[in-house]
Image (cartoon, rainbow, N blue to C red):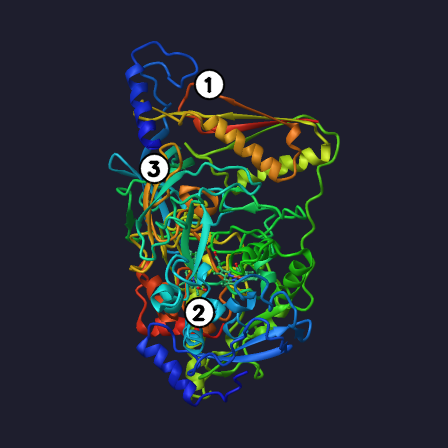
Amino acid sequence: MGLSPIGGWWMGAALAVALAAPVVAASSGTGAPDWWSPGEGKRMPAEASYDNPYGKLTVLNTTGPIETAGHPFFTPLGANGRACVTCHQPSDGMSVSAAHIQARWLETKGKDPLFAAVDGSNCPALPQDKRASHSLLLDHGLFRIFVPWPPKNADGSSLNPDFSIEVVRDPTGCNTDKTYGLKSANPMVSVFRRPRPAVNTKYLTTPDSIAGFNAKTGMPFARDPETGAFVSQELMADGRTLTLKTQAVDAGLSHLETAAPLSPAQLNAIVAFETQVYAAQSASSIGGAFAATGAPPGLGALAMAKGRPGILGNDLKTPVFQSFEVWRPKPGGPTDAGAAFRASVVRGADLYMTKTFWIRDSAHLNTVGLGNPIKRTCSTCHNAQMTGMDVAPGWMDIGTNNLPTADPLAHLPLFKVTCRKDAYPHPFLGRVIYTHDPGRALTTGKCDDVGSITMQQFRGLAARAPYFANGSAKDLMALIVYYDRRYEMKLTDQEKQDFVNFMSVL
Amino acid sequence: MRALRTALLAALALALASAPATAGDGTPPPGTKPPAGRMNFVGCPVIRDTAEVPCWLAEYQGELYYIGIQNDITATFHPPQLKHRALVEGMVSKKPRICGGIVLEPVNVSVIPEVDTRCNKILPAQGYRIDNAPRGTGPASRGMQAASDPNPPPPAPPPPPPAPPFAPRDVAVRFGFDGLYMNFHNFKIVQDTAAYVRASGARKIRIEGHRGATLLSNGRTLVETAGLARQRADKVAEALRGLGVAPASLEVAASEVIETPDGVADFERRRVRIVVTP
C-alpha cells in the first residue's frame, strides 16, 4: 500500500498531468507497486489506500478483511491464468489504468496473463510476443470485446437487426480475420473497451424507482432471469448482461476462458464480494485528506458504503455528489495551495450542477420527451446521487463513438452501419452511420441505439485513466475538452481546470 | 424513408382527391379542410433561448407558432426535436403571442422520424422571456432527504390496488405520428391497466392496434406508415407481458382500416385500444 505523505513529489505529478497532458496520465511513478496478481492468496484488508496521480484512493471491505486464497474473484479459474482481479485492481478503483498496464508489460516482459491473446491483444491471430500486437491495451487501456453478430433476444430466440454492418477500417485485422471476423464461421464484431469499475455495485444494480418505466425504451424494465425482479439495466457499456451473476458468467467464459460457466458457489462468492466492496478517492495530493473533519459528506469510500442508491440528484437539495459547502472559501480563511485547490473543486461542483449548455443531438436523452436540444447541465444526464450515473438505464449517444463527433481514433476499427428502410433510423445520424463501436445496438440490433454507451460511475476516476468506454479521453482534461467541443460549452481554461479538480476528488 | 413514404402517400391522397373517396384508406372527400381555427401542418420546430427556460415554436409559411416550453419527462408537453420536422395539430388560441409566436392551444406535436437537417434553428431571446416556468434550465428545486440521512423517511406507500366491483375497462394508448415510443403518460396507462388486470383477475384482454391519418390545413392528408397498427399492438402486448400480465390472456389484433381524418381529433386515432373484460 503506498501510504506516502500528502504533497511532496506528488504535487509535481499532478501538475504534470494538468499541464503537459501526457498520452496517459502519469502513474504512481515507478511501475505498479500495488499490482494484485491472481492467486497471490494475500489477505485483502478491510480498508486500504493506494496512491494515484491525483492523491489516494481508498477501498473498503464492509464485511471485514477478505481471505483471497481460493476466492473466485482472485483465483485463476480458466485457461489463461487470469482472475477477475487482473482487470479489476483495488489500486485502480477496481478497474485498471493504462499506466499500470504499461508497467506490467515492462515488469513481466509481456508475460502477465493480462496480455492473454483472447482479448488482451489486438487480435488473437496476431503474433503475441510483439508489443504492436497489444497496442490497444498498452496505449489506450482497451480490451477486445467480441460479440456474436447478429445478436439474440434475451430469451435466446433469434433477432432480426435493423441494420447491416460492414467493416470500413480494420487496424487490428480482427474484424476481417478468417477465424475471428465478421465473415468467419462464427461471425462476430470486435470492439475495444475499458474495464468498468466492479465496485460500489449497489448503485449499479438498483433499478430506477419510477416504478418500472424505462424512459430509454418507453417500456418496462427487463427482469432478472433468475428471480423475475426488475433490473437496473446499467451494467456494461452495451447493457448486454442484466445482473452481476450473468455478468460474471460472461466474464468467466470470455476474459478468463473458463471451460464451463462458473459454478453457483463461485458466482455467489463473486457477487457477495462485489456487493460489499466500496471505493472512492480519499485524499488529494494538493487539497489534503478528505477524512479530516469537515470534509464534504459525499466524498470517500465510507460515504459510498453508507449512501442510499436510487436517489435523483438533479436538484439543489440532493446534489449528485452532495454538498461541497465546507470547502467553499470564507473571508479570512486559509489561502495556501490546498485551500485554492479545494476552492477550485467547489467551483467545479457548482459548474457540474448549474452550468447550462445546449445538450443536443444525443440519442436517448434528446429523444425521451425532453426535446432536442434541451438547455441543462452535466447533472441532467449524470443525475444519480453518489455515482453520477443516470437513475434510468444510462445508455445515450453523446457522440464518443460515432462520426462526425468522435475524436480522431485511427487505431480503432470503423464500421459502416446501414439501416433497413422499414426500421426507425438513428434519430440524428439517419440511415448510414459510421461508428467505432455500435454500443447498445450490438445488444438490441436497433439503429437508434448505434453508438449509445451506458454511462460509467464517476468514483475513483483519478485511479483509472483513460476515460470513456473507448478510452478516447486520455485524462480528465481531455474528457472536459471533449464535452466543451461536443456541446459548444465555451468553457474558460479556469472552468476546465475546476471541472478536472472536481472529478479528481470523486 | 418513412417520411418519404408518408409524403408519397400524401401525394397519392392528393391524386386520389378527385376520385370518389373510398372508406377506410384515410382519404377525405375532395376539398375537405380542417374547420376554422385549426392549424395542422408539417414544419420545422424552432427553439428560442429565452430566460427562465427556452420556448418552443414551429415555423409554417413564414409564421411562427408557439407550442410550449422546455420541461421534464413527466410534463404533458413533449417538445419536438431539431433535425426533424414536426407535425403540429393545434387550435389557434385568442391569447396574445408568446415568444413571438401565435399560440396554439391545445396542441399535439409529433416528431417525424426521418432526419431533416434543414430544421436546425435556435433563435436568440430577442427580449422574450418565460416567467413562472415549473422548472428553470438548471437543477430542480424539488426537496428530498439527503442520502447520508441515517433515518431516511419511509418510501411513499404504493397507490392502493384497484378495488371491486370490476367493470370492463376500455382505454386508449396514443402515439405520435408514425411513432412507436410510449411516453411516460402513455406508459402509465398501460401500467394502470396491468394493475387492473392483476387486481380483477381478468382473463381476457383485447389489444387493438390502429394507425391514422391527419388532415392538414393545406387540404392534404398525411397517412401513417403501413404495418404500424400491428407494431403498436405488439408493443403494448409486450409491455403488458413485461408488467406481469399472463401472455395467454392477451388477444392481439391490428386494424389496417384508416378512419377518415377530420383535422380535429386525428391524433386520437393513432392508438392502441385495450379492452379488459374481468
Is the residue A381 above or below the residue A28 in the image? above
Where does label 2 land, which residue?
A: A350
Where is residue B256 shown, x and y percent of the image? 46, 20
Which quarter of the rendered picture does the N terminus of chain A lie within? Answer: bottom right
Quadrant hosting residue A401 = bottom left
On the image, numbered disc 1 is attached to which residue? B257
* Image mark for residue B114: 3
Q: Do circles 3 and 1 both sit on a common chain?
A: yes
Quadrant assignment, res A433: top left
Amino acid residing under circle 2: Asp
Amino acid found under the numbered disc labelled 1? Val
Query: Could you tell me how far apart the alpha carbons at marks 3 and 2 are, in whole angstroms?
Result: 38 Å
The disc numbered 3 marks a residue on which chain?
B
| SS at mark 3 in the image | loop
Q: Chain of mark 1?
A: B
Q: Nearer the viewer, mark 3 or mark 2?
A: 3
Residue drawn at (36%, 66%), measured in percent from left and top? A135
